[in-house]
Amino acid sequence: MRLRLAAAALAAVGLLAGCADVVDGSGALGGTAGPSGPSSTPDFPGQSGGPSASAPSLSPPGSSAPGSGSASGGPPPTPCPHVTFAGAKLSFDCITTGFVSETDNAVWPLTEVKTVEAGTGWVLEEGAGHWGPAQGRTLGDIAKSVRTQMVDEGGYGDNPTIDTVSDADTTVDGAQAHLLHTKFSLNPAWAKTRKTAVKQEQLWIVAIKVGSDDVSLWYTSIPDLVSELWAKVPSIIKTIKVG
C-alpha cells in the first residue's frame, strides 16, 4: 500500500500535512511531542480538532487524541516483531520481518511498513489505532468507516475495484470484535502510470471492543507481490491480545 516515490515528491514541495502518502521521519504518535513540539494529529483524522484537508471526519466527535501512545500519556509502542500499543490497549505479532515503524500516517497512528517493490517503494503495512467511544456505531460500522478513509486517502490509487471478502462479527482474545476483509484490484491505467507491478492488495481490519465503551482497531494491508503472506493473516489475528 502506498507508493513512496509519490510521497518523496510531495515532501519536496512541503505538502506534508494531512497526507497519508507522505512520510518525513519526524512524525509523532497522536499527541506526542515531536521535533517541533506537541502534535495535534488524532488517531483518525476528525477525532479531535476537525478533519484534515484531504480526509472526511469519520471518527466520533469530541474524542481526544492520545499522547505518547495512550490517552493518559503512557509508554510509546514497542516496535516489531511484537508490538505493544498501550494507547490502543492492544499487542500483536508482526506478520513478517524487516518492518520499520511509522507514526505519521494520516489514518493510522501506528504503522509498521516494509518495502516490497524497490522501484516504486510500494509497502506492505500492519498497525493499530485507538477509536474511543463507539457512540452508537457498531464495530462493523467503525471498520467500514476506517476502510473508507484509507481509500479516500489514496492508498489504493484512483478508482480501485473494492470487493468485500468477509464482513462478520468475531472475537479476539475473548473480546467482541468485527473482521472486515477487503480485496482491492488496482485501476490498471493508474498502476501503469505509476509503473507498479501490483495488481491486487488485500486489507484486513479488525475492530475490537477493548473496554465497556472503548474501541481499538488492528489492520494489515498486503499487496500481491507478497501474496504468500495472505494465508498467515488468520494466525496473526490470533496473536492479538487485549489489555
Image (cartoon, rainbow, N blue to C red):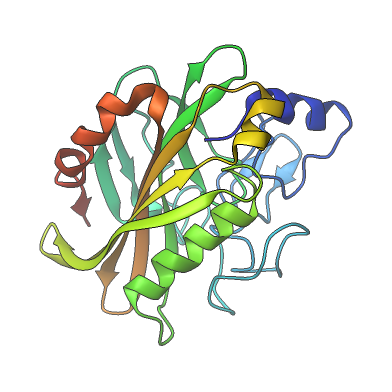
The image quadrant of residue 81 is top left
- Vertical order, 62 against 57 (above or below): below
* Residue depicted at x 68% and y 60%: 55
Task: Left or right? Give the position of 220 relative to 237.
Answer: right
Residue 85 location (% of width, % of height):
35, 46
Q: Nearer the viewer, residue 92 or 153?
A: 153
Task: Left or right? Give the position of 208 relative to 202.
Answer: left
Q: Nearer the viewer, residue 139 or 29?
A: 139
Task: Left or right? Give the position of 204 relative to 4.
Answer: left
* Residue depicted at x 55% and y 53%: 150
Examine the rendering and report whether any part of residue 95 can be seen. no
Farthest residue, direction bottom: 136
Q: Nearer the viewer, residue 66 or 80?
A: 80
Farthest residue, direction right: 13
Instruction: Look at the image and tell me in which quarter the C terminus lies.
Output: bottom left
- Vertical order, 97 against 171 (above or below): above
